[in-house]
Amino acid sequence: MLTTLLAFALTIMVIVAIHEYGHYLAMRLFGVRVLVFSIGFGPQLAKWKSKTGTKFVISAIPLGGYVRPLDKRDTEILPGQESEEFSHKPAWQRVIVYAAGPVANFILAIFLYWVIFLGGQLGVPPVLGEVAEGSPAATAGLVDGDEIRALDGKEVLTWQQVNMELIRHVGSVKPLAITVVDTEQQERQVSLDLTAWSQDPEAPVFEVLGIAPRPLAPILGQVIKGGAADQAGLQENDRILTANEAPVKGWSDWVAMVQSSPEKPMVLEVQRGQQTQHITLTPQSKEVDGERIGLAGVQLGGLRQLDYGFFESLGAALTRTADQVTMILGSFKKMLLGQLSVKTLGGPITIAQAAGETAAIGFDSFLLFLAFFSISLGVINLLPVPMLDGGWIMFGLIEMIRRKPLSDDVLMTAQKMGFAFVLALMSLAIFNDLVRQFS
């Protein structure tokens, strides 16, 4: 619970801070005086004033933030401050100011993806395990051992990439073209019917389509220096065949056997290259939640390494960001057309859970979530809805076309409608969260 709360708070504070800093920089670029830069709401935990007169605030409730410029509509303008006032600035400058927040979110996502891709990625090859009889996958002709190479023409190298591409097709009834390679390395194309998934987009996609990843093989990855596996002489790429004469069918079997044998010798039959040998491993003991478990000190092997160069990683980051922007916009479009249920919307509880789960997996996983959430916030804020940045951008563009601003009455009415829409959307997302928690 503590990890979830901390990860959620960090996620919101970072994403909001970047978003508001985008607005702040654009305002300063055009000579606007910024009165307050606030992260969070409620009781103030810390505050300080810059040389330019901006009061920076960090508050206790990390559920948003704001930048308050000098604006004659809510602040008294002193003599000599007219040029620093926001509302009198040209419409094109105000449009840039409102767009700068979402753009900052996109830049953050690109940077995070770039850093992650620079370090390389490990992923599980998308090889199919059992295909459910009578399922859409079986009807399409997919079989155990097929490796997915492309979805709708987009190359995929890991199950994570398969998941990302499938999300782009949520709610779609159009058959999905899949390129696969069989165990004989023969390539073929199949057409997968997504109708069953479109009828229940909240259901586990693999279960609905009738596919499952092949169980992870008991192949060793990096051996931690000084750990039990290192001391026993195990090496990277070793395949565990048996443990105390019991067959080890998959990685989960291997983990369970090691964890149930703290400080107990295990005689392993290991395949190394073309040879087979016997090695004795004595797992180290560690207490977890009051229970002693065994640790071998070795990571999962048999993964696919994805390496990117300096510029290649930047291109991959830009592509990933663009793909996710179009995927999110496509999901909104499907909701409006009734092709995707509004039940798929998630609120703060869903965000908190996702933040906690990814943080528990590892730092890279949390950064991936942070990047995706940053993109989501950027896209949502660009929607042409009053109260959001996109609404103000829309008003600014209309003013540029008309060559005069909209009336205060029109703006006020639009603001009320936008507030009602945003409030309804937030209420629906929170309701969906509660239904998921208690159903």
Image (cartoon, rainbow, N blue to C red):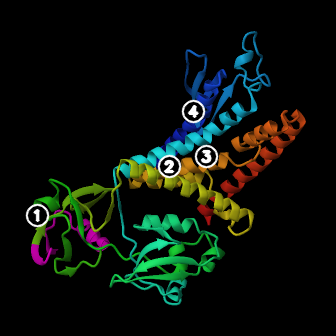
Q: CA distance from mark 3 to mark 1?
A: 51 Å
For the residues labelled 3 and 2, the Cα–Cα distance comes to: 11 Å
- Sequence order check, earlier mark of 3 and 1: 1
Q: Secondary structure at mark 3?
A: helix
Q: Where residue 113 sits in the image (x, y, percent)?
A: 44, 50
The earlier-in-sequence mark between 3 and 4 is: 4
Residue 400 locus on image (x, y percent): 79, 36
Q: Which residue is mark 4?
A: 21
The correct choice, above or below, for 55 with respect to 348 in the image is above
Badge 1 density bin: few <14, some 14–19, many ≥20, Cα 10 Å = few
359 lies left or right of 203: left
- Res 64 visible: no
Which residue position holds label 1? 233
Residue located beneath label 3 in the image: 378
Q: Residue at x 55, y 81 (%)?
A: 192
Question: Quick check: 221 above or below 207?
Answer: above
Instruction: Tell me if mark 3 has few (under 14), some (14-19) or many (20+) residues whose alpha carbon lies within 10 angstroms of its own.
Output: many
Q: Nearer the viewer, residue 274 or 7?
A: 274
Identify the residue under disc 2: 371
